[in-house]
Image (tube, rainbow, N blue to C red):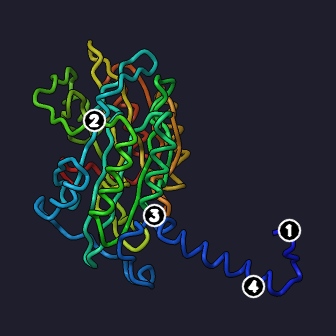
Amino acid sequence: MADERPDDPRSARIASRRRVLAAAAMAPVLTGVPAGARALPAGTRERAPVEPVTTSLADWGDVGRALGRSGDMKRFMYHTGLPRRDLTVLSHGVRISPALALGTHVSFVRYADGSTLLMGDCVVTEHELQGFVDVLQEHGITPTAIHKHLLAHTPQIWWVHVHAHGHDPVTVAGGLRAAFERTGTPPYDPVTAAPPVDLDTAAIDAALGVGGTADDGVYRCTFARRETITHGPVVLPPGLGAMTSVTFQPLGGGRAALTGDLVMTAPEVQPALVALRRAGIDLVELHHHNLTDEPRLFFVHYWAVGDAVGLARGLRRAVDATNVVPMAQGVG
């Protein structure tokens, strides 16, 4: 206020009290704990990292109902995929399959202390982006990255990583549902007859040194970090926010569109980027997924179109510049 002078003790006390109240009001949002959820106990970060525990699909019924979409189990993770089949997206003249780069994914993990972690990657149009983030924040769900997976694409699409950690996953799921309702994300629609993957998948596997899998018309290979990755007070299970993904969309004649991301520590970033460029693979975005992971991880999204096996051989040199191991299919 105009009449509150800096040297007025009463004004200083009022200003200090306002700062304390503002900080208290923002605390649930800043920690990623929904306002209606029970906060984590004080001092959690000073303890040994908490390990994830195995759950079953039956343990997540209330979460699935609150989210309004059914999910499945990927080892430790209750996982729900929400592909943006409502969008027709072109990048460099290639029509992007939803399975290639338009899949929203959210996962919940239960921990030994009874807490639950949400992590996910959400596909939104540029028109939807701000409203989507606003609703996330209203429900105490924090965006940890806003980035691109594709180059020169229409319409403009953004990918938003989301995070929440607390004791009420049903409230979190309800907040996610409210955010998705601000977008055109369609209801869950299981694929009944995916087109065949017209690629030499055996040669791709040999080139990359990993066994891939067909997934809704694309071919996917994955790698996980060798280290134990923590995020704040918890251990991340393999595949949650710390995975290298390689995805091929067949274009005919052995050609494919290639996209995905490499997970890297800081010393690995430049060797991996050099290897990608020497293989003729375009760089899309260098970013993070998490805010407090240890070791600190970075991700580079990439893009290429060409002979699928040749692209796999070139990509292998970039993968080999990182400390990853082939990931068994179905591990989460």
The quadrant where residue 57 appears = bottom left
Q: What element carries label 2?
A: loop
Label 3 sits on what residue type? Asp
Q: How far apart are marks 4 and 2 (CA)?
A: 51 Å
Query: Residue 13, which numbered label?
Result: 4
Q: Position of residue 71 (x, y in %)?
A: 18, 50
> Earlier along the polypeptide chain: callout 3 or callout 4?
4
Q: Which of marks 3 and 2 is in front?
A: 2
Local packing at callout 1 (Cα closer than 10 Å; few below 14, some 14-19, many 20+) is few
Q: How far apart are marks 3 and 2 (CA)?
A: 32 Å
Image-based side of 302 in relation to 203, left or right: right
Contact between labelled residues 4 and 1, with CB atoms less than 8 Å apart: no
> Earlier along the polypeptide chain: callout 4 or callout 2?
4
Contact between labelled residues 1 and 3, with CB atoms less than 8 Å apart: no
The quadrant where residue 124 appears = top left
Name the residue beneath numbered marker 3: 293
Which residue is at a point 41% across and 20% down the rendered structure image?
90
Local packing at callout 3 (Cα closer than 10 Å; few below 14, some 14-19, many 20+) is some
Q: Distance between the residues labelled 1 and 2?
A: 51 Å
Query: Residue 186, which numbered label?
Result: 2
Which residue is at a point 15% across and 36% down the rendered structure image?
190
Q: Where is residue 243 in the image (x, y as percent from the top left)?
A: 35, 50
Q: In this view, does 110 lie above or below 267?
A: below
Q: Position of residue 219 (x, y in %)?
A: 24, 32
Q: Distance between the residues labelled 3 and 1?
A: 44 Å
Local packing at callout 4 (Cα closer than 10 Å; few below 14, some 14-19, many 20+) is few
Q: How far apart are marks 3 and 4 (CA)?
A: 38 Å
Q: Is residue 189 above or below residue 179?
A: above
Q: Nearer the viewer, mark 3 or mark 4?
A: 4
Q: Nearer the viewer, mark 1 or mark 4?
A: 1
Name the residue beneath numbered marker 1: 2
Placement of the C terminus among the 4 image quadrants: bottom left
